[in-house]
């Protein structure tokens, strides 16, 4: 099915302009794809084997085109384990990108802030992650075509790409935090006790995505840049209820600086 999906996309994409950069755009951040030039837009439902999105803020479209002088393939919306999907469905698009020859994956998400120096609207460069989801996309028979049985995760988030992001953020005067992202399975938001646990473990932000895609990308020898939009403070910090509407609202308010940073990073790669 991975090969079928990749073959379908190769037929629909210009042979001389295959993408080298992939993007996974998280909750409320899919608007970036609207600024891709010469776009070719393909609905997920038209791609063989592609899962469908079920979450608000995820449009369910692949957008190919020119972005800041680079040929890119952007996902407007991702898949989550909490939707009831198999973990292999969650990472299916990353495998397809791998077969298309994409070498760099820029992955974004909306996350709750655990680090109390953060505030809603901050951007956080992901330096590492903690997988608290209880699942790993590499479980089962290894896909030798992509990578080894036991891939090294010491530098899952590419150091050079992180340096580029920090440099470009400084040029733009965009405050860019950095920290560790923890993935919980969801879909319920975390309890205050769970947030205290994650803080003790060294997490700075928490969400319900990203980690499976990153593990899969690293397995396939892709270089990864991860950026979180801190859309709310995690449970127990501000003593107020958490809602998905708040997540989308903050992502909307943050989109300008988020897009400026991604534009600069892509131009600099």
Image (spheres, rainbow, N blue to C red):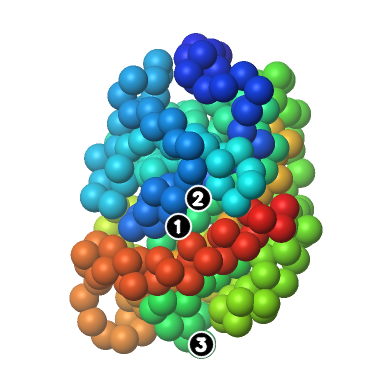
Can residue 211 be seen from the camera position used here?
A: no
Q: Are marks 2 and 1 in contact (CB under 8 Å)?
A: yes
Foreground residue, 138 or 89?
Answer: 89
Residue 157 figure quarter: bottom right
Q: Is residue 252 above or below residue 84?
A: below
- Marks 3 and 2 sit apart, C-alpha to C-alpha, by 23 Å
- Residue at x 66% of width, y 23% of height: 16
Q: Which class describes the residues within 10 Å of circle 3: few (<14), some (14-19), or many (20+)?
A: few
What SS does tag 2 mark?
loop
Foreground residue, 95 or 42?
Answer: 42
Foreground residue, 92 or 139?
Answer: 92
Which mark is first along the chain, 1 or 2? 1
Foreground residue, 214 or 142?
Answer: 214
- Marks 2 and 1 sit apart, C-alpha to C-alpha, by 7 Å
Can residue 262 be seen from the camera position used here?
A: yes
Q: Which residue is mark 1?
A: 109
- Marks 1 and 3 sit apart, C-alpha to C-alpha, by 19 Å
- Residue at x 51% of width, y 87% of height: 117
What SS does tag 1 mark?
strand
Instruction: Say left or right for 102 vs 245.
Output: right
Label placed on residue 210: 2
Instruction: Say left or right for 78 vs 103.
Output: left
Where is residue 65? Give x, y as percent. Answer: 52, 37
Residue 21 figure quarter: top right
Instruction: Say left or right for 64 vs 46.
Output: right
Which mark is first along the chain, 3 or 1? 1
Q: Which residue is mark 3?
A: 117
Q: Is residue 266 above or below residue 14?
A: below
Q: Are marks 1 and 3 in contact (CB under 8 Å)?
A: no
Give the number of the mark in front: 1 or 3.
Answer: 1
- Residue at x 39% of width, y 32% of height: 41
Which mark is first along the chain, 2 or 3? 3
């Amino acid at each position: 099915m991975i090969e079928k999906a990749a073959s379908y996309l190769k037929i629909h994409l210009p042979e001389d302009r295959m993408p080298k950069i992939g993007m996974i755009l998280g909750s409320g951040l899919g608007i970036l794809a609207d600024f891709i030039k010469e776009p070719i837009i393909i609905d997920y439902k038209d791609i063989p084997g592609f899962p469908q999105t079920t979450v608000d803020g995820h449009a369910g479209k692949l957008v190919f085109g020119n972005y800041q002088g680079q040929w890119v393939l952007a996902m407007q919306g991702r898949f989550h384990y909490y939707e009831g999907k198999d973990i292999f469905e969650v990472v299916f698009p990353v495998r397809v990108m791998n077969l298309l020859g994409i070498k760099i994956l820029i992955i974004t998400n909306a996350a709750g802030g655990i680090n109390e120096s953060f505030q809603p609207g901050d951007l956080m460069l992901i330096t590492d992650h903690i997988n608290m989801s209880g699942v790993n996309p590499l479980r089962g028979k290894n896909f030798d075509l992509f990578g080894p049985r036991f891939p090294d995760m010491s530098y899952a988030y590419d150091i050079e790409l992180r340096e580029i992001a920090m440099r470009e953020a400084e040029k733009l005067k965009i405050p860019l935090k950095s920290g560790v992202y923890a993935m919980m399975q969801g879909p319920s938001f975390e309890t205050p006790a769970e947030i205290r646990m994650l803080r003790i473990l060294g997490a700075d932000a928490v969400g319900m995505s990203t980690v499976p895609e990153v593990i899969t990308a690293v397995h396939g020898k892709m270089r990864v840049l991860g950026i979180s939009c801190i859309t709310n403070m995690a449970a127990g910090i501000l003593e107020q209820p958490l809602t998905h509407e708040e997540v989308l609202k903050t992502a909307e308010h943050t989109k300008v600086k988020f897009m400026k940073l991604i534009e600069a990073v892509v131009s600099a790669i």
